[in-house]
Amino acid sequence: MDTWRYKAVDPGGRTMSGTMEAANVTDLEMRLSRMGLDLINGRTVSRHGLLTRFKRVSRSELINFSFHLEQLLNAGVPIVDALRDLGATIEDPTFRDVVAELVEAIEGGRTFSEALSAFPGVFSKVYVSMVRVGEESGRLPKVLADLAGMLRWQDELIAHAKNVMIYPAMVFVVVGAVIGFLMIYLVPQLTSFLENMDVAMPRHTRVLIAVSDFFVAWWWAVLAGLIAIPLVIRYLSGASPRFRYRWDSFKLRLWLFGDFMWKLRLARFSNYFALMYASGISVLEALRLSRGLMDNVVLEQAIERVHTQIAEGRGISEAFASAGMFPPLIVRMMRVGETSGALDEALYNVSYFYSREVREAVERLQPTIQPLLIVLLGGLLGWIMLAVLGPVYSELTAIGF
C-alpha cells in the first residue's frame, strides 16, 4: 500500500487533512467514506506506512484520548463512533492517522486491543494489556479512566524528574563556560603579565599555567570528549550487557541523584503494578510487563528473580524480600496486602509514599546545588587570584614595598 496525503470535508463542512494508507485513490475514498469524510483530493507521499506505527505522540494527547474515549463509552456511544469523533478533534496529524487506522482495524473484525497492539510506539504493552483485560471483563471505560489517571501521574512524576536533571545540567554548562573563559582567555593574559615582570613562580602558579596551556592547545579535544562520552556510554550500554549492568548500578549509587532515581523507579513500579493487578492482570503477567518499565538492568533483573520465585510457588512478599533490591517498606506493605487481600491498595500506598519522596527530593536538590556552585566558582577564582597575585606580592615585598 502507498501512503496518501489527503484533503477531505466532514459532514459539518469543515476541511480536514491528513495521511492514510490506501491501495489507490478509490480505496482512499472508500476508507475516508467509512470515517464519514468526503475526499476532495489526495496524492501519494514517500513516507512508508510502517514508520507511522513506531512514531510517538505526546503523553498529553494520549491522556486526552483515554479520558475522552472513556467518557464517550460511558455515555453509551459505540467504540467505532467514539473513535471517529475523537479522530475529528485530534490536532496531531500522526495521532489522527493512528485513530483512523484503529477504526479501520475494528471495522475489519479486530478487537480494540488488537488494533492498539499494531502501534507499539504509541500504545505501550501495559496500555494494550489493560485494555485487553477491560474488554474481556466488560470494564473497558473503567480501565480507560485508570489509564488516563496513570498517565497523568506519570506525567507529573516525569516533570519532577526533569526539574532535577535540568538544573544540574544548566549549572554544569555555566561552570564549564566560566572555566573555559578563565583558562583560555583570562589566565594567558595574566601569565603574560607575570612573565613581563620576570618574577619567580611558585608551584601552584606553574600548575595553573600548565592547565591553561592545556586548555588553549586542546580545547577542541575537551569539547569533543564532552560530546563523545555520552555517545560512547550509550553505545557500550547497548553492545555490552556487563557494561550496562555496571553503569546502571553506578547510576543508582550516584551522589545526590542515585537515591532520587531509585525512588522514582520504585514509585513507577508500585503504581503500574498496583494498577495492573487491580485491573485483573495476574501477578506474574504484571511483573513481566513491569520489568520493561524500570529502564535499569539492575532492577529489571531483580524483578525477573521475583517472577521466577513466584512462579516456583513462593509467596509474593517472600520473593521480593529474597531479591535483595527492594526496601523493607515495599516488602512489609506487600506482606500486609497479601494477608488482607488488598495488595493493590498496599502498592498504591507505596507509590504515594515514593512519589512524595521524589517531590521532596526536587525541593531539596536546588538549595543543595546552589552553595556547591558558589563554593566551586569561588574556589576557582581564589586559586587564580592567589596564583597570579601571590608572586606579584612576593616580588613587591622583596624590593621593600
Image (spheres, rainbow, N blue to C red):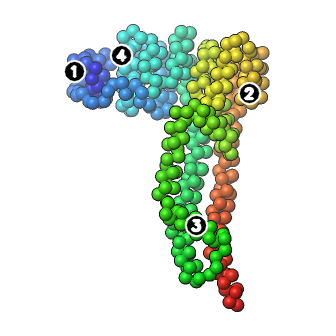
Tag 1 secondary structure: helix
> In the rendering, at what x and y percent does residue 22 appear?
28, 20
Distance CA(mark 2)–CA(mark 1): 60 Å
Q: 142 or 130, which is in the foreground? A: 130
- Residue 317 in view in this figure: no
Q: Residue furthest bottom?
A: 400
Tag 2 secondary structure: loop
> In the rendering, at what x and y percent does residue 11 appear?
29, 22
The residue singled out by tag 1 in the image is: 25
Circle number at residue 210: 3
**Quadrant in which the C terminus appears:** bottom right
The residue singled out by tag 4 in the image is: 104
Q: Amino acid at mark 1?
A: Val
Q: Indicate which disc, 2 or 1, sits on the residue closer to the N terminus.
A: 1
Q: Indicate which disc, 4 or 1, sits on the residue closer to the N terminus.
A: 1
Residue at left offset 73%, top offset 19%: 319
Distance CA(mark 3)–CA(mark 2): 48 Å
The residue singled out by tag 2 in the image is: 324
Q: Amino acid at mark 2?
A: Gly
